[in-house]
Image (cartoon, rainbow, N blue to C red):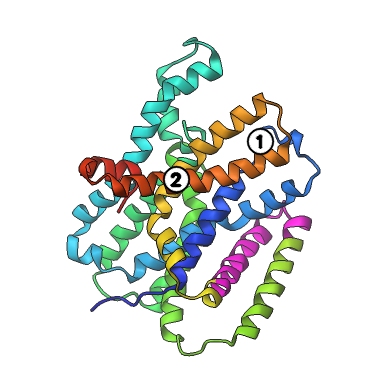
Amino acid sequence: MKSKRFPEIDTLYTLGTFLVIAGHSHSSDWSVFSGTVLTSIINFIYVFHMPLFFFVSGFLFINSNSLGKSGYGKWLKQKALRLLTPYIVLSAVAIIPKYLLENRGFSGFTTKYLLEAILVPRIGVWGHFWFLPVLMLLYTAFGAWKKLLRKDTGNIVLFTILVACVILYFLPYGTDWFGFNDFKKAALYFTSGMISNCFIKRHSNNKPRSVIRLFIIAVGLVSCILMTHFFSKNEFIMLLTALIMIYVCWQIASLVGENKLTHWICNNNFTIYIYSWPFQALTMAILEKLYFPWYVVTLCMFVVGITIPILIILVYQKLQRIHNRFFNLLLGIR
């Protein structure tokens, strides 16, 4: 049986992609824009932009038939190739040039540094790549669970998993190796996506009117902005804020509906995500060397982060002769 397609997912991926690029569009030296509205915007975006991606991943995962068709081993191999090929290859290509630029030589370059650059995603060569191994861990864990279950997921099972993920989220122990600290938090949003899929399918006919959606969006957005401003140190409230903003984003996606632009960005969001930051980082380095003000740097980084990856996609689509499995994986092309 073919799984139902939700057009809202296109818009959620589009919103998430633009939020990631916006969240990265600032100088690495926060002091140059300290006290400006940009600080508040970035802090707000960072509360929910990556939880939104993990939520969508869980939402699609529970509804997918590919695991059952391929088998766990083959399915996991396909996920690993797609997620880890750009992660490993681009990290390997950039690790030595980055080290030389930051340290002006090979002094201090050790095996430990090399291992951390790959196995500790947050401090890796490309910091924004931490999402890739964490998502791989989620697919590994939840894929095994779904395969072992061998039947439709019931409410009790999903509720049990949710409780376990809440406990894991607040577990005081953690390590950055293999992205475990991020996995602890991502698992809860991934599970929330699975539960939301089951709930929405059962209540798909009970859709609020547009005016109600607009009211929900306005109240949710204002509430979350206030909570982020006044309770940013409270982990529970920040979790609640992220979940509310995911719900707000869903309402926005429902209003937008199905269209060609969001569908195209959704299909290419992985490539845009991977290649936005390297070009943003290069833009930041050049403009800061030329002493451009922070707001010019921010605007240019945002524009470059969107346009250059899109140009890469369009050019690659034209160059049919060079298409092969490796380049598709490296560029994140489906």
Dividing the image into 4 quarters, which one contains the C terminus?
A: bottom left
Residue 309 is marked as 2
Q: Vertical placement of 7 versus 58: above or below? A: below
- In front: 320, or 67? 320
**Residue at 27% from the left image edge and 44% from the top image edge:** 319
Residue 31 screen position, x and y as percent: 75, 34
**Residue at 20% from the left image edge and 53% from the top image edge:** 73
| Secondary element at tag 1 | loop
Q: Which residue type does callout 1 highlight?
A: Ser
The answer to whether one can see residue 171 in this image is: no
**Residue at 74% from the left image edge and 35% from the top image edge:** 293
Look at the image and give the residue range highlighted in magenta: 227-252
**Residue at 42% from the left image edge and 68% from the top image edge:** 260
Residue 27, by quadrant, is: top right
Mark 1 lies on residue: 27
| Secondary element at tag 2 | helix
- In front: 323, or 61? 323
The stretch drawn in magenta includes residue 241: yes
- In front: 174, or 242? 242
Apparent side of residue 213 relative to residue 14 in the rendered image (left or right): right
Apparent side of residue 246 relative to residue 214 in the rendered image (left or right): left
